[in-house]
Image (cartoon, rainbow, N blue to C red):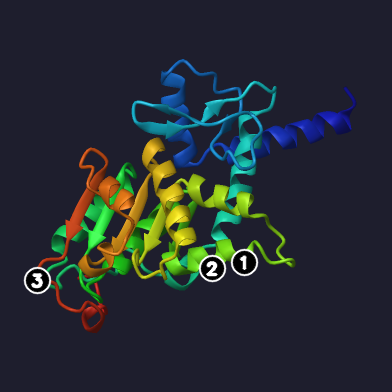
Amino acid sequence: MPRSNRSERSAYLSRQKESASTPWTQGNTRQFRSEGGDERRPLCNARDICSHGPCREIRGVRLFKQCRKPLWFGLYIREGERCRLKVSALSNLAALRDKGFANFNWRVPGVQEAFRVAREFADHPAGWLLFIGPNGCGKTRLAAAIANQCLDQEMSVLFVTVPDLLDHLRATFAPTSTITYDELFSRVREAELLVLDDLGTEQLSPWVGEKLFQLFNHRYNWRLPTVITTNDVHLQTVDARIRSRLTDSSLVREVGFAGARDYRPHSSFTRT
């Protein structure tokens, strides 16, 4: 092999090793290997950009599927980064990127339990988390903290208010749209973590009800990590089929904000 080719291959393998060295990647690789998988093969976690078939679920945790094409593992992780960038383009999280657990004022009355549960979920995203509480109690703030921690762990995260999500979907039908409805909807429903803020504030219509049900039903069937914020009034306006799924205690953990005050006047917090 010519020296230039050897040098290029060495640099390429070095890049692949670096791309496969993140904590999130290593954790999935270890679990995949423990199930008898071959880590030398690429792993897939984004069906909208992978042609090798759907992901599989092992012991309740949705993992990569072993692909059969002879590609290096790290190569697909770079494809996964493309997926994360696609999802982030839809997200409302940029304006809340500084909202984390370290600067959340957990001393505000009524938020302690929600704070504890949110941290547990962010450390081990699994199942659904349903925040129900009055306006201003800190639901969105905690949901953003979860999303930011998972994003820092290199998961594909979509944080979006439900009305904004529906606007994005409608916009795909415009003649000038650069993305099809099917492609956008696939990105949303396949996000590794989906945070739906203000469920129930959307304007109801048969189309809205159908699309939200399809989204919730898919993530319910596949047990994909999902965080939902709403309040008691808005929740009653949601499709009965969605409300039924939100009551499934085997998947959904409901967290209330009993006695919570308005969080915003107390949001400034300095850790001591």
Q: Please give the name of the residue rendered at 66% of the width and 62% of the height, measured from the top-left corner.
A: 173
Residue 190: x and y, percent?
A: 50, 45
* Viewer-closest of 185 and 258: 185
Q: Residue furthest right?
A: 2
Residue under numbered circle 2: 167
Specify the label residue 259 is tagged with.
3
Residue 21: x and y, percent?
A: 53, 38
Comparing labels 2 and 3, the label whose residue is closer to the camera: 2
* Viewer-closest of 95 and 2: 95
Whether pointer 3 and pointer 1 mark residues with C-beta atoms closer than 8 Å, the reply is no
Whether pointer 1 and pointer 2 mark residues with C-beta atoms closer than 8 Å, the reply is yes
Mark 1 vs mark 2, CA separation in Å: 6 Å
Kind of element beneath mark 3: loop
Tell me the amino acid under the disc marked 2: Asp
Within 10 angstroms of label 2, few (less than 14), some, or many (20 or more) residues? few
Comparing labels 3 and 1, the label whose residue is closer to the camera: 1
Q: Is residue 255 above or below residue 5?
A: below
Q: Residue furthest front?
A: 206
User: Which part of the image, by quadrant, shows the N terminus?
Assistant: top right
Tell me the amino acid under the disc marked 1: Ala
Q: Residue furthest bottom?
A: 265
Residue under numbered circle 1: 171
Q: Is 33 positioned to the left or the right of 236 in the image?
A: right
Q: Please give the name of the residue rendered at 66% of the width and 28% of the height, measured from the top-left corner.
A: 72
Mark 3 vs mark 1, CA separation in Å: 40 Å
Tell me the amino acid under the disc marked 3: Gly
Choose top left, top right, bottom left or bottom right for residue 200. bottom left
Q: Please give the name of the residue rendered at 35% of the width and 57% of the height, measured from the top-left corner.
A: 146
